[in-house]
Amino acid sequence: QVQLVESGGGLVQPGGSLRLSCAASGSIFSIIAMGWYRQAPGKERELVAIITTGGSTNYANSEKGRFTISIDNTKNTVYLQIDSLKPEDTAVYYCNADISAMGWDTTNFWGQGTQVTVSS
């Protein structure tokens, strides 16, 4: 089994910054890609950014510039740096990963989510 454990969320004032982390552990042969999604109250879950282990990134158009995704392949950990936070960034941020446990398979996993609240 694979676990994704997020950390780094919290209460931040508008204009502040946060760095979210997500560490994958368990039965991992290889990681194909990791990413971040978010779900605001009353809204559907939406993509924030994805990164492959090769370093290729894909951002939701609305998040380019303030969000930076990175990955540490040695630690099986993905990071999301969020700058110039706005109240509308308030959401539960979920880690997501495509992971191979056997070398020939790919399974998609979700973390439990970490709350980010932007408020003065």
Image (cartoon, helix red, strand yellow):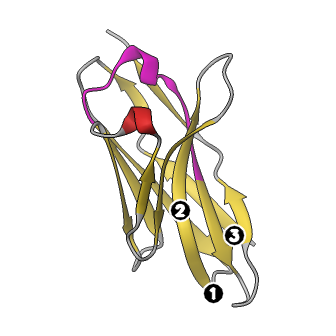
- Left or right: residue 13 compared with residue 47: left
User: From what the image shows, is residue 80 above or below residue 98?
Assistant: above
Secondary structure of residue under mark 3:
strand
Q: CA distance from mark 1 to mark 3?
A: 11 Å
Name the residue rendered at 39%, 80% in the picture: 74
Task: Say which residue appears at 57% left-offset and 56% top-offset.
Answer: 5
Location of residue 96 (image quadrant): bottom right
Which numbered disc, 2 or 1, marks the residue that appears first in the sequence?
1
Determine the CA span between mark 2 and mark 1.
14 Å
- The amino acid beneath tag 2 is Met
Q: Hey, what amino acid is under mark 3?
A: Val
The location of residue 24, given as percent across then percent down, is 56, 67
Q: Residue furthest bottom?
A: 103
User: In the image, which disc is placed on residue 2?
Assistant: 3
Magenta range: 83-95
Residue holding disc 2: 34
Asked if residue 107 lies left or right of residue 58, the reply is right
* Residue 41, image x, y percentages: 63, 18
* SS of the residue under disc 2: strand
| Residue 89: in magenta span | yes
Q: Amino acid at mark 1?
A: Phe
Residue 14 x %, y % = 28, 17
- If you read the primary sequence from the N terminus, does the residue marked by circle 1 or circle 3 appear first? 3
Q: Is residue 90 left or right of residue 68?
A: right
